[in-house]
Image (cartoon, rainbow, N blue to C red):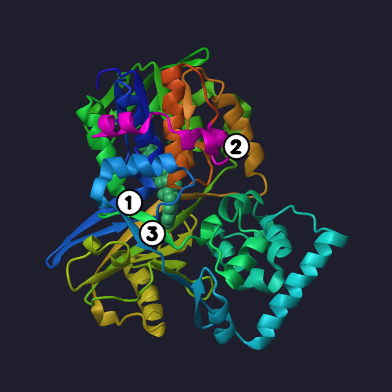
Amino acid sequence: MSSPDTLILGAGPAGMAASFELARAGKRVAVVERASQVGGLAKTLRFERPEGTYLTDIGPHRFFSKNAYLYQLIGNILQEQWKSVPRHTRFFVGGKYYAYPIKLGNVLSQMPKTKILGMLWDYSFERVRSVIRPRPIRTFEDYALSCFGRTLAEFNILNYTEKIWGIPCNQINVDWASQRIAGLSPLATVAAIFFKKRSAKSLVDSFYYPAKGSGLIYETMRAHVEQRGGTVATDTHPVKYICEGNRVVSVDIEGPQGITTVSPSSVVSSVPLMESVRLFGNHAPAEVREAAKNLRFRAQVYLFLTVAREHMAPDNWIYFPNKDIPFGRISEMKNFSTSMCPPGKTSLFIEFFCFEGDEIWTATAERLLALAAEWLERLKLLKREEILSYHHLREPNAYPLYDLTYRQHTATILSWMDRLENFYTIGRPGRFRYTNQDHSLEMGILTARSIIEGKRHNVDTIGDSREYFERGFLPDEQMKTSSR
Ligand SMILES: Cc1cc2nc3c(=O)[nH]c(=O)nc-3n(C[C@H](O)[C@H](O)[C@H](O)COP(=O)(O)OP(=O)(O)OC[C@H]3O[C@@H](n4cnc5c(N)ncnc54)[C@H](O)[C@@H]3O)c2cc1C
């Protein structure tokens, strides 16, 4: 590999957006990706079966953003393959399915009256309390209780959150609330239930989705980068950063052809923050290396089932917050796009939350299938004999774990790393920040602008730097011609 202007490590949304934007500006870029395809957590997997081709995302990847520029950008590169999809999602609690976002009629008809009274009582209590003696908000549990009251919080927030994270809600940082349910104030929620107002971000009624899975965005970006002379090397990863003073002067990279050394002007990394610290070796100060030991990701294990049936349910996905059900969510990819399955068949993507090394992580495919199939039958979603094939996948770095101390550790690491002159750590794993695709894309674009302009922009403002992005970096007409 010859030395590029910019070396990009990781070909997820953040890395691909950075490479796309830099290549568009005429920079020589090289992308290095450990996996065998691009797209990161938002990639789309392909399974060839005798009855045809199945496609699946790693969990459901709807696209939503406050940033109009991103919709234009993706619309321009995907053209008619970028489609609006109606959202239909439910959650299953206490033996009943409820619409999500919550609908008043549905709750009133399904839920025991005592529970409804409990919700109203607890919610009113919290409202009065917030005026007289506000609850101190230190953890995610404090936040959920103060916003919704205990009964509503326990109904569909606290239980699912604990299932995702594997630790009690009073050990989860309140930052999770601001990233996950920001804008979902009590008033917004109540307005949504009673007046069908859908302003908050978690309550949108439709979303955008590429016809052949979310990975199509990143495969198309890859094609654009390669057309402009950039390279994308999969099954390849960095093994060492070589530094002089405050700069990364070269990077050793290992791929199918062995180890090569490249000396780029800048390095953009979206590899997990702890791994980056390791790649710096002793160049990273001792307190940075120590801080990295205290961060961990929540992992996931997945089962993908191909199914001899036209449809399982009307939902894009269904949440299962109750802890007695071993999985957390199932998605039917056909309800995102009919191109995800051969005609007459469907597929299910089943997500289990776990930590690397625990009994779910180490379970065999057959064990997971047995667990899942038992529940799918009990829930009357499908019969075991309808399963045509099963595929077992593992993802170690699914969710950066927002425990009560993660902030201080990431601050220690990032305040050192962000001072390196030509090194940029971005994206969900790179900043240890719970981003969705839109914010990772924004981080990639903003970092590309930092390199092009020779002036470092702060990617931590993404999420509140809406105005900057709504203007876009290129006028619409220029963007259309340059992105085709
Ligand atoms: C189950 C699930 C459902 C989700 N649903 C949605 C959704 O509905 N909507 C949405 O917008 N977002 C969703 N997300 C979030 C979305 O997937 C992420 O926000 C997005 O993929 C983050 O992009 P990224 O580039 O920051 O990181 P990643 O996608 O994690 O990409 C990082 C890349 O770096 C590579 N890498 C790691 N280490 C190395 C190394 N040492 N060398 C080289 N390469 C390396 C990885 O293989 C990966 O390709 C979901 C995530 C999960 C797990």
Badge number at residue 60:
3
Q: Residue at x 69, y 86 (%)?
A: 114
- Cβ at disc 3 under 8 Å from ligand 1: yes
x and y percentages locating residue 42 in the rendered image: 36, 49
Q: Residue at x 51, y 82 (%)?
A: 96
Instruction: Tell me: residue 65, above or below residue 24.
Output: below
Mark closer to the chain start, 1 or 2: 1
Left or right of 133: which side holds 453? Answer: left
Q: For numbered disc 2, what is the local secondary structure?
A: helix
Quarter of the image for residue 78 reads top left
Asked whether 464 falls inside the magenta stretch, the response is: yes
- Cβ at disc 1 under 8 Å from ligand 1: yes
Circle 1 sits on which residue?
214
Q: For numbered disc 1, what is the local secondary structure?
A: loop
x and y percentages locating residue 386 in the rendered image: 24, 79
Asked whether 173 falls inside the magenta stretch, the response is: no
Name the amino acid type tagged 3: Pro
Q: Residue furthest left?
A: 50
User: Which callout, 1 or 2, points to the residue nearer the camera?
Assistant: 1
Left or right of 169: which side holds 66? Answer: left
State the extent of the magenta-drawn residues as a range. 459-484
The crowd level at tag 3 (other Cα within 10 Å; few <14, some 14-19, many 20+) is many
Q: Quadrant of the C terminus?
A: top left
Name the amino acid type tagged 2: Thr
Mark closer to the chain start, 3 or 1: 3
User: Which callout, 2 or 3, points to the residue nearer the camera?
Assistant: 3
Mark closer to the chain start, 2 or 3: 3
CA distance for labels 3 and 1: 9 Å
SS assignment for the magenta stretch, majority: helix
